[in-house]
Image: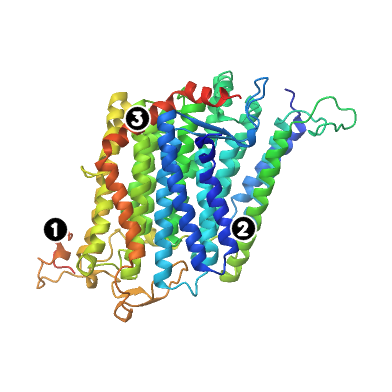
Amino acid sequence: MTSYLVPLMLIGGLMSTGVYLLLERTLTRMLLGLLLIGNGVNLLILSVGGPSGNPPVRGRTSDGQTATADPLAQGMILTAIVITMGIAAFVLALAYRSYRLTTAEDVGLDPEDIRVSQMAADGGLEEARPAPEPSRDTDLPDELDALPGLEGSR
Amino acid sequence: MNLAAVLTPLPVLIPTLGAALTMVAGRRPRLQRAITLAALSVVVGVCATLVYLTDRDGTLVLNVGGWGQTVGGMGPLGITLVVDRLSALMLVVSSIVLLAVVFYAIGQGIRDGDERQPVSIFLPTYLVLSAGVCTAFLAGDLFNLFVGFEVLLSASFVLLTIGASEDRVRAGISYVMVSMVSSLVFLFGIALVYAATGTLNLAELAVRLDGVTDGTRSALFAVLLVAFGIKAAVFPLSTWLPDSYPTAPAPVTAVFAGLLTKVGVYAIIRAHSLLFPEGGLDPLLLVAALLTMLIGILGAIAQSDIKRLLSFTLVSHIGYMVFGIALSSELGMSGAIYYVAHHIVVQTTLFLVVGLIERQAGASTLQRLGGLAATSPLLAFVFVVPALNLGGIPPFSGFIGKVALLEAGAQEGSALAWILVGGGVLTSLLTLYVVVRVWTKAFWRAREDAPEGHLSGAAPSVLLDEPEDIQFVDRDHVGRMPFGMLAPTGALIVVGLTLTVMAGPIFAYSERAANQVLDRDQYISAVLGSAE
């Protein structure tokens, strides 16, 4: 199988630009990155599908070609294009919705992640314990998980 | 035309047709529900029959549209659907889970009010998701597997962002992006495989990949493994999961947690055993399995939201399955298969129980929960059985699966395998610690002792995300747990217990399935020898 350098370089360019864009936090750029990678992969499928040739339809010829082009590669690309287009439409809808809700289209941080990391920074993952209250009955069931020395703290 | 040829495509066809019909019946919720329940019930029946047929007759192959092998021996030209024991087992467990969860969602919808909720899209999307899951399990070629993934992913995007609240849109964006990257990596892998071999049919690939040089094979496997690893949430690629799943409605989270990652695990099993059986990347997989188990469960310890906590245990337990696969032995594989079945059921049940907790107590975070054992002993019971099952307490199926995996690790005997065995035991103990922590906090202590115990969600919410906090004392009494939600949860608990009670026959089945999965020649001759 011969492979041509120019398509491969093009694929590499599309992929690397796509990855760069995908690493951004802005939703439209991420979407563009996704589309570029998708196109890169589609080109890759096309270029691994062998040389060009007659359309894979019985009795149709094209410009003096002798071989027939690989129909499977075309079929796969078509499917992949349709899927990518559908998802792109969905992402656009999400971006619009996100913009309506937050007037920004940056992807925010997960609030639960922030909370956990704050708790860790505050020195403990357990929730803040109130001061011990020795007068309370420590035989209540909720004390069974109290740490030694902190019984009666709730 | 025999029975098997009729039944094989039905797990895909019926939900797809059901989705179309429910779309048409969008304005008639009762008809929608009836269609959905009927469709998924029939699928359960079909899948159970497929289990029986594959166990009796061996692998079933269907060349869709008759585009099989040509007279000249050119490989199957069209789409090939293959059911072997592994696929059949995955199909039947998934279809039971799908039916139970939709029953739960419908029950919740009937009880807690559908009028304000955008349900007309929920059931059709759910059916599309079912069709996608079944396609992935039936696929006999890589591209069809990709299409199955895409179908279930597109449906899952809609389900995850249903109602499009701020939280869900944020979670949805990262979920969509990560999933799409994994799909594109998969497509990239498909292109490379196609370049190396000129075919995508799994059986033909298994033959032709033997003629490819070792380096190329490892590279191809690595690319596919990254794609499947993101879907299955194997450690370095798992961070998306706990951020995105918990924001979805309870039934949606339940079905995602049960099925979507397992589709990735299934794909890894297929690729590992059929396409790349020499196991060159096994040490890498073992290390990934160890890290998945440990880091997942350590993450779970830090969480206070039960949904997030369970998402982390989900990630952690994927490690057990990868461990079994990477051992490349029959015992390891059969342990992994049994564990997949067990984990689908138990993880789904736990998420359904969290849905019940959220409805009854108005919160799913340990910061607010307390006193549930006193208010609702029944709820405590339905939580504690699957929780102990997940933790691997002896009579339950989690214990049986883990013992099989540990035994397989000991049988392997290498230093790395022993480290994995130790890691597996440690993870099991930590899982127990995590569920016991939920138990003591949410069920045993008094609600006043929870730091934010006075706060609560306003009203039970079905599909929409309504983060409106009120004082717990002001919350309307929600009544008893609806039968429509409790029954499917109970049914899944019974299924989980069946895995224990019937462990002998089921484990024997998973051993036969593992035997079949590892016997490539049998798969190849079933697909390529079926020229008519």
The C terminus of chain A lies in quadrant: bottom left
The extreme front residue here reads: B1
Compared with residue A117, is residue A61 higher up or lower down, i.e. above or below?
above
The N terminus of chain A lies in quadrant: top right
Q: Is residue B163 left or right of residue B386?
A: right
Compared with residue A122, is residue B346 higher up or lower down, i.e. above or below?
above
Q: Is residue B260 left or right of residue B403?
A: right
Tell me the SS state at disc 2: helix
Three-letter code, disc 3? Glu
* Tag 3 and tag 2 share a subunit: no
* Residue bearing mark 3: B511
Which-is-in-front pick, marks 2 and 1? 2
Circle 1 crowding by C-alpha within 10 Å: few under 14, some 14–19, many from 20? few
Instruction: Kindly identify the residue that appears in the image at 55 percent across and 45 percent down.
Output: B149
* Tag 3 and tag 1 share a subunit: no
Three-letter code, disc 2? Val
Tell me the SS state at disc 1: loop
Dot 1: chain letter: A
Judge by depth and name the residue closer to the eye, A30 or B114.
Answer: B114
Circle 2 crowding by C-alpha within 10 Å: few under 14, some 14–19, many from 20? many
Which picture quadrant has residue B155?
Answer: bottom right
Tell me the SS state at disc 3: helix
Specify whether residue B421 is in view: no
Q: CA distance from mark 3 to mark 1?
A: 48 Å
Q: CA distance from mark 3 to mark 2?
A: 43 Å
Q: Which mark is residue A148?
A: 1
Compared with residue A76, is residue B127 higher up or lower down, i.e. above or below?
below
Specify whether residue B514 is in view: yes
Compared with residue A89, is residue B46 higher up or lower down, i.e. above or below?
above
